Image (spheres, rainbow, N blue to C red):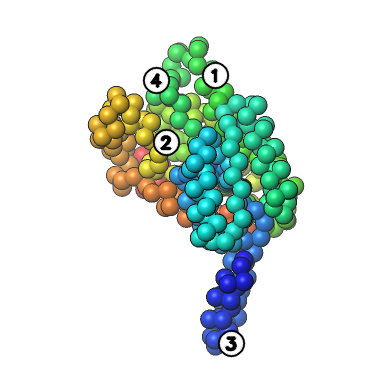
């Protein structure tokens, strides 16, 4: 926390009556605690990841943001977060869909954590996403013979990346303080109907959800919390690929077709904004007291009920 932020918080608190002052000091102490250590966020320069990074930075967390290939967007995100919140931000580009790319990216992220920041990790949010151009035409229906490369790419970016990052984060987390949050999707656990046309990412995120529960069980003794958040249909740039595909190059035609297809399934019949998903992720990563672990939390306007 910067000196300016400290003074802005301290002066109004000390002007309150004693009982109110004690309560506010406890809340403020929790806010400071939420800022200890680094927040590692994959997919952190756009969409849900960036929306989450904004909330964590507002709490004082320094950030390491992993991203794919858009260097300009990463630089803009880092500048925004540094200017708005006075935190340190390191961005690391890399491809999480291949074994070699994933290993290189993970090594670079933790070289930054240890070398450029203070070596402690407060939270890890796995929000990386991937939309393969063949996603909508590749299904588990007898046509997988030539599609295992895509299958493996989704395994790499979701469960394998979760494990790779988590295994590096866990030794750097303080007992009672570390938090891990994975971003999943509806239909990726045994409590919900599988989502048709989400075959490839779905199988990978189903594995990821199992890993969340296992990590939660194994790390509970240290007071580390591991959870998954399942967004509904969230209007991020990744959906533009589907819009272009459905509209055969016409974005507005694709937008209309996608809205008709996707929103008809959602009880609230609207797209979520990334900031709405980030609210729950940030709570789990920086605000909760430490009893929520092993949970799968839908933030989807009731989509999980259908």
Separation of disc 1 and disc 3 at Cα? Answer: 63 Å
Alpha carbon separation for disc pair 1 and 4: 14 Å
Relative to 1, does residue 57 appear above or below in the rendering? above
Q: Earlier in the sequence, mark 1 or mark 2?
A: 1
Which residue carries the number 3 mark? 18
How far apart are labels 1 and 2 at the CA level?
Answer: 20 Å
Residue bearing the label numbered 2: 238
- Mark 4 vs mark 3: which is more N-terminal? 3
**Looking at the image, which residue is at 73% across and 48% down?**
115
Q: Earlier in the sequence, mark 3 or mark 2?
A: 3
Cβ atoms at labels 3 and 2 below 8 Å apart: no
Q: Is residue 146 above or below residue 44?
A: above
Query: Callout 3: 10 Å neighbours few (<14), some, many (20+)?
Result: few
Percent from the top left, x then y, of residue 195?
41, 31
Q: Is residue 139 left or right of residue 63?
A: left
Q: Earlier in the sequence, mark 1 or mark 3?
A: 3
Say whether residue 57 is left or right of residue 271. right
Q: In front here: 220 or 161?
A: 161
15 to 124, vertically: above or below:
below
Instruction: Report the residue at 60% width, 80% height from top.
Output: 22
Nearer the camera: disc 3 or disc 2: 2
User: Marks 4 and 2, Cα distance to the nearest angstrom?
Assistant: 17 Å
Secondary element type, mark 2: helix
Assess whether mark 3 and mark 1 are in contact (beta carbons under 8 angstroms).
Answer: no
Q: Nearer the viewer, residue 228 or 161?
A: 161
Q: Which mark is residue 137?
A: 4
């Amino acid at each position: 926390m910067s000196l300016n932020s400290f003074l802005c918080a301290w002066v109004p608190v000390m002007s309150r009556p004693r009982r109110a002052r004690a309560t506010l000091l406890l809340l403020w102490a929790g806010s400071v605690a939420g800022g200890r250590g680094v927040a590692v966020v994959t997919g952190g320069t756009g969409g849900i990841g960036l929306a989450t990074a904004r909330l964590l930075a507002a709490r004082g967390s320094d950030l390491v943001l992993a991203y794919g290939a858009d260097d300009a967007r990463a630089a803009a995100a880092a500048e925004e977060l540094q200017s708005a919140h006075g935190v340190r931000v390191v961005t690391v580009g890399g491809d999480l869909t291949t074994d070699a790319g994933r290993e290189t990216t993970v090594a670079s992220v933790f070289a930054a954590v240890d070398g450029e920041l203070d070596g402690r990790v407060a939270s890890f949010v796995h929000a990386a996403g991937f939309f393969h151009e063949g996603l909508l035409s590749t299904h588990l229906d007898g046509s997988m013979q030539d599609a295992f490369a895509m299958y493996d790419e989704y395994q790499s970016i979701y469960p394998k990346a979760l494990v790779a990052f988590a295994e590096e984060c866990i030794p750097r987390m303080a007992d009672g303080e570390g938090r891990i949050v994975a971003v999943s999707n509806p239909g990726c656990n045994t409590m919900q109907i599988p989502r048709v046309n989400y075959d490839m990412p779905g199988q990978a995120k189903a594995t990821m959800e199992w890993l969340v529960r296992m990590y939660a069980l194994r790390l509970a003794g240290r007071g580390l919390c591991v959870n998954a958040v399942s967004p509904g249909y969230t209007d991020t740039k990744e959906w533009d690929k589907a819009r272009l595909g459905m509209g055969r190059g016409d974005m507005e035609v694709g937008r209309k077709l996608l809205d008709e297809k996707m929103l008809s399934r959602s009880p609230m019949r609207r797209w979520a904004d990334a900031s709405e998903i980030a609210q729950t992720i940030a709570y789990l990563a920086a605000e909760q007291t430490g009893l929520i672990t092993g949970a799968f939390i839908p933030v989807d306007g009731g989509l999980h009920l259908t």
